[in-house]
């Protein structure tokens, strides 16, 4: 791609350094590590990264990441148990799945309400969530948003929007620490909070 | 590549988690980050990773990583100043180059002598180093190996092997901390140690 023999390497290092948790030094070490393991690690990684970059997309129904139009959770009849767990991000969905305690489906908002950043109900896929209450015969919506101000504001907004549907609305129990983000919790904490979930106050 | 819509994602996360400095959690976050920035970060990274995996190779002369048969340092007449700096790894060469204080060429051993691991003089590219003393009219060999037991053992071995050539042999000055590895030092420390380098005791 470039004429200088180091500029491609440097470009690769700069790209790696932009990943969360990596900086220039760890990016350099990662790139050298990969070049040393060219056949066993670098080639498979580059192929899989290219493949996922080409195929990963948001599930049209719930917002989960999938390589199919509709993710395997939405496609599974077993997950149609009348419960939808609303989360902010895909990483939260993954954290819930790792806990192994939830048998229903998800709705990934993709963030929280933020009028200042122009993130409104449409951006959070609220219309789709309302449709799903009916089309998937939902009886309970579990609002598993982060225990942050933005997360709780958004949870109350959603509770208000869904009040007329008569669906039960619950939140994760005490157990999620104040200011805590789901993706940082251990699986046991998530399991306990899910088991002890309580009715959302109206 | 797989039929299950999550197995490719999980495979990618597992591959990323093998990089030094990353673990399962940071690999998950990195992959989600990339998918969110598919066009601006994931596609360019996958293209550059594929390109470097296809083109990066060891310089036939010095062992530096390059996308050419002979790296730009070996190809540059300006770097033919009669000095060769011997380092263990490419990361050490990069650390030396960042210090901006060395105008000669390098010889990358690719490790240290280790009879137990079957790493002998051939594996460390010693024959090539001996050839270069003559072919590149070298007057000084700077042994910039790590200040570890293995590094210093290897430095003494090299000094013995080159003794008959009459070439001057130096080591980096005090300033490299005991047990320290070049790649972890700040540029100023490397500069100071290089300026105050001393004759290798025979
Ligand atoms: Zn889905
Ligand atoms: Zn070279």
Image (tube, coloured by chain):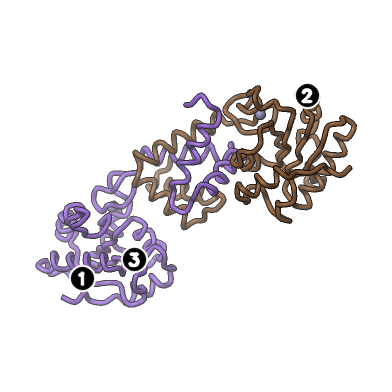
Chain colours: A brown, B purple
- Image quadrant holding the C terminus of chain B, namely bottom left
Say if mark 3 contacts mark 2, CB within 8 Å: no
Q: Secondary structure at mark 2?
A: loop
Question: Which of the chains bears the disc numbered 2?
Answer: A
Rendered view: B73 above or below A43: below
Mark 3 near ligand 2 (CB under 8 Å)? no
* Foreground label between 3 and 1: 1
> Which residue shows up at 35% across the image and 73% down it?
B176
List the residue tagged with mark 2. Answer: A137
Please tell me the numbered disc located at residue B149. none
Decide if residue A8 is on the left or right side of residue B58: right
User: Dot 3, how many residues are within 10 Å of its Cα: few (below 14), some (14-19), or many (20+)?
Assistant: some
Same-subunit check for callouts 3 and 1 = yes
Q: Secondary structure at mark 3?
A: loop
> Which residue shows up at 32% across the image and 55% down it?
B73
Question: Which of the chains bears the disc numbered 1?
Answer: B
Q: Position of residue A77 (x, y in %)?
A: 65, 22
Q: Position of residue B86 (x, y in %)?
A: 26, 62
List the residue tagged with mark 1. Answer: B169
Mark 2 near ligand 1 (CB under 8 Å)? no
> Which residue shows up at 46% across the image and 58% down it?
A25
Question: Which of the chains bears the disc numbered 3?
Answer: B
Rendered view: B147 above or below A5: below
Same-subunit check for callouts 3 and 2 = no
User: Dot 1, how many residues are within 10 Å of its Cα: few (below 14), some (14-19), or many (20+)?
Assistant: many
Q: CA distance from mark 3 to mark 2?
A: 72 Å
Q: CA distance from mark 1 to mark 2?
A: 81 Å
Q: Position of residue B166 (x, y in %)?
A: 12, 70
Q: CA distance from mark 3 to mark 1?
A: 15 Å
Q: Nearer the viewer, residue B193 or B88?
A: B88
List the residue tagged with mark 3. Answer: B102
Decide if residue A50 is on the left or right side of residue A70: left
């Amino acid at each position: 791609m470039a004429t200088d023999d180091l500029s491609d390497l440097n470009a690769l290092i700069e790209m790696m350094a932009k990943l969360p948790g990596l900086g220039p030094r760890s990016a350099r070490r990662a790139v050298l590590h990969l070049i040393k393991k060219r056949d066993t690690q670098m080639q498979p990684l580059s192929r899989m990264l290219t493949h996922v970059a080409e195929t990963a997309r948001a599930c049209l129904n719930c917002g989960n990441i999938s390589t199919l139009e509709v993710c395997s959770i939405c496609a599974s009849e077993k997950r149609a148990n009348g419960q939808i767990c609303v989360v902010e991000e895909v990483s939260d969905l993954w954290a819930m799945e790792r806990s192994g305690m939830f048998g229903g489906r998800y709705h990934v908002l993709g963030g929280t309400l933020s009028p200042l950043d122009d993130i409104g109900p449409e951006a959070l896929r609220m219309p789709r969530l309302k449709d799903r209450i009916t089309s998937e015969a939902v009886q309970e919506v579990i609002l598993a948003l982060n225990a942050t101000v933005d997360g709780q504001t958004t949870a109350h907004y959603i509770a208000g929007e869904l009040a007329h549907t008569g669906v039960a609305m619950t939140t994760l129990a005490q157990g999620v620490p104040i200011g805590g983000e789901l993706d940082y919790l251990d699986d046991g904490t998530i399991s306990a909070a899910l088991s002890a979930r309580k009715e959302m106050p109206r």
